Image (spheres, rainbow, N blue to C red):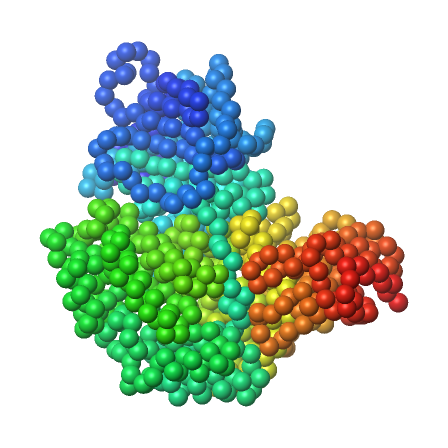
Amino acid sequence: MKFTDGQWMLQPGVAAHYAAEAYAIEVHEDRLVVLATTRPIKHRGDTLQGPTLTVTLSSPLEGVIRVSVEHYTASQAPRLHIPMVGAGKPAVRIVDGETHATLTSGALSVDVKKGEGWSLTFREGERVLTKSDWRGLGYIQWGTKGNHVHEQLTLGVGENVYGLGERFTPFVKNGQVVENTNKDGGTACEQVYKSVPFYLTNRGYGVLVNEAGPVSFEVGSEKVARVQFSREGESLDYCVIAGPTPKEVVSRLTALTGRAPLPPAWSFGLWLTTSFTTQYDEATATHFIDEMKRRELPLSVFHFDCFWMREFQWCDFEWDRRGFPEPEAMLKRLHAKGLKISLWINPYVAQKSPLFAEGVKHGYFIKRTNGLTFQTDQWQPGMAIVDFTNPAAKAWYQGHLRRLLATGADCFKTDFGERIPSEGVTYFDGSDPVEMHNLYALQYNEAVFELLQEVQGDDAIVFARSTYASGQRFPVHWGGDCWSTFESMAESLRGGLSLTSCGFAFWSHDIGGFEGNPPPAVYKRWIQFGLMSSHSRLHGSSFYRVPWLVDEESCDVLRVFTRLKHQLMPYLYAKAHEATQTGVPLMRAMLLEHPHDPACTTLDRQYHLGESLLVAPVFTDSGEVDFYLPALAGAGLWTHLLSGEKKAGGSWHRETHGYLSMPLYAAPGSVIAWGAETERPDYDYSRGTVLRVFELADGASAAFTVVGMDGSVAARGTVSRRGAQYTAQVSEGALRDWGLDVDGRRSPVVTEGATLNWAVA
């Protein structure tokens, strides 16, 4: 929201009161409390009238400084904030100097300038990260538009801003106006399903605006050298998060707001769905599954979308017996084929559903201010919305899901959760509906994930569309309604990179696009992109997404890349487990992996899977693709994972790829654990493992880790090189029937043993 009219004037009707000086500073053991006046205090008369702002500086986590700003402290109900499951009271150091008071947490400090001239300066050591200075912190009165508090933090020359949730607009957010409100808008606009009021910059710090309700960001768009964020009301709360690297920022963010548990290994395989409005029944589903088997197309999960339930009755959690006369027996047959089963749900109950009257009777739904049930026709006619702030409603909803799990479902696609009213309604626990709008998605997914953990244990996983900050605790998330075009494929990737830069470890998207019928080129290139994502799902709206309905070559592409992902699982699952420990996502923007390479600061058409694998999807009919390989100090050439071709780092490359290939490069100096299984993602990664070594410099060593299905370390060790001699040493755990691969040359197999010495001929 813009409050000014250019550099000098204000918008009509705006009265702005900017922090002008730190008039008084209270020093406490764990915080600084600053009385900020909105005009210089020259004499006693200046202390009368006019707003003051109370600014409290504290630290919820080492390396994080929290700034809480209040105008009125008792005139509004307590605000809802982002869940900070890792918040504590770390040791801080406070120095009350002559000209400044300083609070330090870990390597991060904030200096408060005393006296006239407002200034908060955030430093990492002696390096200044950002500041709130002249007219940065403000209290705004705007007539019928209400009162607001805003902060403006400075941007340096060449400083880029990233993140702010799953944004499909340009990856670099400078110049954008970003409204932090969940909406069901699809991927082709500025609206998002997954708002996260967090931004990361290439200067090596992040900012989390600790608000549940809508926050408006002006990213170099009101003041080009500042990021402004504002919130209607009498207060504003934010945290500055130290680096110095982007990975360390994201790691601290997730230490504060929570990290994802490890998804089950089977979930990394291929998911196939019925699609949305297509005609399907048990025979259709069985035909798709059997045809995938006949064509040797590995399949791990089959998903039943909305119409597994009877029309007009979503969600009543009852199979439509016209198409699925014996659902429990059907699910047993599908399990016997080695499949997991996913069912579509949403948090709404249609008026025609038998559950509607029950929910109304017991008060399980969000209500209007007159005490009656809120209803809408925007999706299912007459539907009500489950109120998860009501413990009884939550237990009721979970009870129906528990029944489905007992009859053979394995997981749920938690669709919707964005079309939630922000006014004219009340919640069971009295929460402000404006602030609950974004938090609703968290409560919805938490309710489902909590039940899955109770029943399925480590196999718990949702496939969620909506979420909010801290929602990475309930994986996995997918990108929503995209179109069957290259442009939409690219915007989906931008959304994924923006979301993972906010600490979301696992992310997926609809292979082939959701809306429309993908041309063969789009479908095949999207298969490549989809299988080189953390999770991979074929899904569409009005057309089936099985490959043989596109063309025969699509079957070949799907087979090759599904099997490739399966063989990469020892590496990918180790990186997935690492993400649960560090918060660094599996899919990484180039900036995260190469923060010191200026060529990587704007790249949004390629990414890393872990640190060792670079992926550049193809977005053209011709197969031509431009991509950048970073220079790594003291390292050799990048190696194409499929062809073995070598290319230099520190330069751009242009290649043309057929449909069975794409730019997929292993970083020099890396070891990638390569699995023995091609037909499924969940297997013993420690047996038959080949440690593929890429451009290891003479005298250098590289580490590897292989984990088990529960995320525990199965084997850990190093590979080192001395001339033509390679030595692999397993220092923890064990590998069986394992060996090395250097440039396509295989070592002898080690049946049992922890050491391999091999001279490459």
Q: Name the one closer to the observer, 727 or 511.
A: 727
Where is residue 698 drawn, in percent x and y? 83, 54
Where is residue 173 drawn, in percent x and y? 46, 50
Question: Can you name the residue that lies furthest to the top here?
Answer: 43
User: How many numbered tags mark residues here?
Assistant: 0
Answer with the quarter of the image where residue 222 lies.
top left
For the N terminus, give its image quadrant. Answer: top left
Identify which residue is drawn at 35% across, 32% down. Answer: 69
Could you tell me if residue 116 is visible in this image?
no
223 to 694, vertically: above or below:
above
Where is residue 594 drawn, in percent x and y? 63, 50
Where is residue 607 drawn, in percent x and y? 58, 59
- Does 500 sit left or right of 6 as displayed? right
Identify which residue is drawn at 50% across, 39% down. Answer: 241
565 to 175, vertically: above or below:
below
Answer with the quarter of the image where residue 276 lies.
bottom left
Could you tell me if residue 572 is visible in this image?
yes
Identify which residue is drawn at 54% across, 66% down. Answer: 265
- Does 242 sit left or right of 747 as displayed? left
- Does 361 sit left or right of 659 as displayed? left
Identify which residue is drawn at 21% across, 72% down. Answer: 353
Answer with the quarter of the image where residue 84 lies.
top left
Question: Can you name the residue that lies furthest to the left here?
Answer: 370
Q: Name the one closer to the observer, 109 or 292.
A: 292
